[in-house]
Image (cartoon, rainbow, N blue to C red):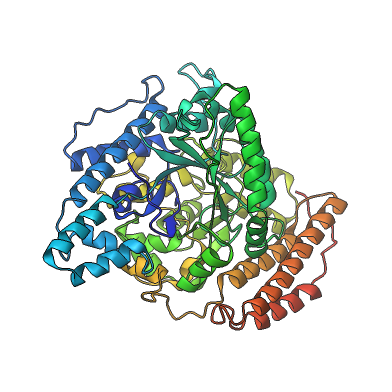
Amino acid sequence: MNISSTHTFHIPVMGIGFTIDSPIKVAHYGISSAISIIEDQLIEQMRKIYCAKWNILFLAIPDDEPDSRAKRITSYLNLIDYIVKEQLAQLVTQPFNMGNDITKYFDLLPDNSPLKLAFINLKKLSSEERIIAENDLRRKIVTGAIEVNIMTKIDKPKLDKEGNELPAEFSDALSALRGFANSNLNASVIFSAGLNPRLYSYCESFEDFFPDKNGFVKKKIILKVSDYRSALIQGKFLAKKGLWISEFRIESGLNCGGHAFATEGLLMGPILEEFKNRRDELLNTLYEICESALVQGGKYNFATKPNLKITAQGGIGTSMEHNFLLKYYQLNSTGWGSPFLLVPEVTNVDEYTLQELANAKQDDYYLSNSSPLGVPFNNFKLSSSEEQRKLRIEKKRPGSPCYKKFLEFNTEFTEKPICTASRQYQKLKIEQLELTCENEEVLKNEISKVMEKDCLCEGLGASALLKNDVKPAHKLSAVAICPGPNLAYFSGVFSLKQMVDHIYGRTNILNKIPRSNMFINELKLYVQYWKNENKNFSIQIAQKRDAYLNKFKENLLQGIEYYKNLANEMENQASELFDDMLNELLQIEKSLLLIRINSQTPVVV
């Protein structure tokens, strides 16, 4: 199957279930999207749903079947591969009539695409010429990429029936990778949330991650990174094993959906500038290491130097921002995530949550401590999951029953790891705090933090089942959703065409809330984050604490200086994009300089 580069945007992974079947919905239109493959129980349910829709025999893979997790993932990915190929086969045979998918395919393309221009030109041709031109266009139709995402931190060991730990390859992340590697897909795996040496090394077990005799790599690797240094470190780790990174996907540390992995004040613009300036250096360094490793390992070489894509995502909201990123930073694509939560054709958002998102206010989106991973998590105040969490607290039964157990990492009270969102952990932790904490105000705050943790295994997958009229297991149907703060500037429910037309500047679907450009919005988020860290920092060693906060502030100020220079440089080329930017930068800089580091010793419970 040919893989598309016809569109200049992609749809990143969102939650566990929101994009779990997005390739089936958009790949035949040439649009790339990513799915999470960490939750095999949900994957098995989605496979059953789509087997029924496509009249395919469904043979369940039970929990107790050996290697069931990997097998479920392989079977689901093979099903997606089959469906997308069938959709493509049907699409290319359709007449070019209004309303047909083949017409929609070309209509969605960016206006400067050669394929789009050739499509528009069809109406100018005579009958004979048109038939020839139509057949030529049919041959050039390709699908969007089907990408899978593995969050590297979710890599809990698996136990057998007797409670004995199974070999490492049966851990959550390694099983997921094996499920992908054994699938029929010609696709990419996205590794997010940082370097996992065991997981990265496991790629060596599968030939599809290495070049074949023609230099073709069937299973590619994408690394989601926060900065250049991270890209180089992780890239070298993989290259030394003969594993090529086909793409570095740069994501804003705070202006994104889901878990927010904040940098130490390093901002998107300066990060992208470094990638732009050092792209060739990065390519050549990794290529040299990778080629050497392939030779030493007795593997096939690349026929020619492989491509290295650089893409970015997080907080992009207008066609001007999209185009500027592509042109100025020479990106291959930009990621548009959270706005697609308002597009029912593309993502799985149940009707209740969809309407709440469509009518939400700006302060309904917030950065929370809800994740059991201990990483800041973008949350939505009006979700049914938040409502359920508060109701449990009112009933004096905080915490959630824990069935899926993907986030069981805490051994504070038990020998066997448990989840900090579980009812068991929260009961034990609250009891401990009540016994040991004498300050009533501190006690109240600490208990509140404990009870803020919420079940994401169930909540982030429930919406996919609800939208398909399937009752989630264990009667846990509350939906957790994790949009980025940029969604505050979109209100309503949109079609795929409306959203794509917005991305390409053919329409404007932003609401009337005043919106600074994406760089300023991210800067504001980082300044607020720094203020919170300054106020609540919990590192007990003052010297380490001050060094962190000073470095963070220094990086913010350097980022502001970079944006000042950029705004001056781009004044004539992208004036609308940088309108009022200098004034906002000066105001933010002034307020930041006035704040001193809080040198008080943090309260330790």
For the N terminus, which image quadrant? top left
Give the vertical position of 74 relative to 544 (above or below). above
Q: Quadrant of residue 418?
A: top right
Q: Is residue 495 visible?
A: no
Q: Residue at horizontal 57%, vertical 60%?
A: 367
Residue 595 horizontal/vertical position (percent): 79, 72
Left or right: 434 as drawn, with respect to 149 = right
In front of the other: 447 or 330: 330
Residue 153 horizontal/vertical position (percent): 58, 39
Left or right: 552 as drawn, with respect to 255 = right
Give the vertical position of 468 relative to 293 (above or below). below
Residue 145 horizontal/vertical position (percent): 39, 47
Left or right: 560 as drawn, with respect to 63 = right
In front of the other: 18 or 107: 107
Q: Is residue 110 visible?
A: yes
Residue 403 horizontal/vertical position (percent): 43, 35
How many badges with numbers are in the image?
0
Q: Residue at horizontal 82%, vertical 65%?
A: 597
In front of the other: 558 or 171: 558
Q: Residue at horizontal 22%, vertical 62%?
A: 103
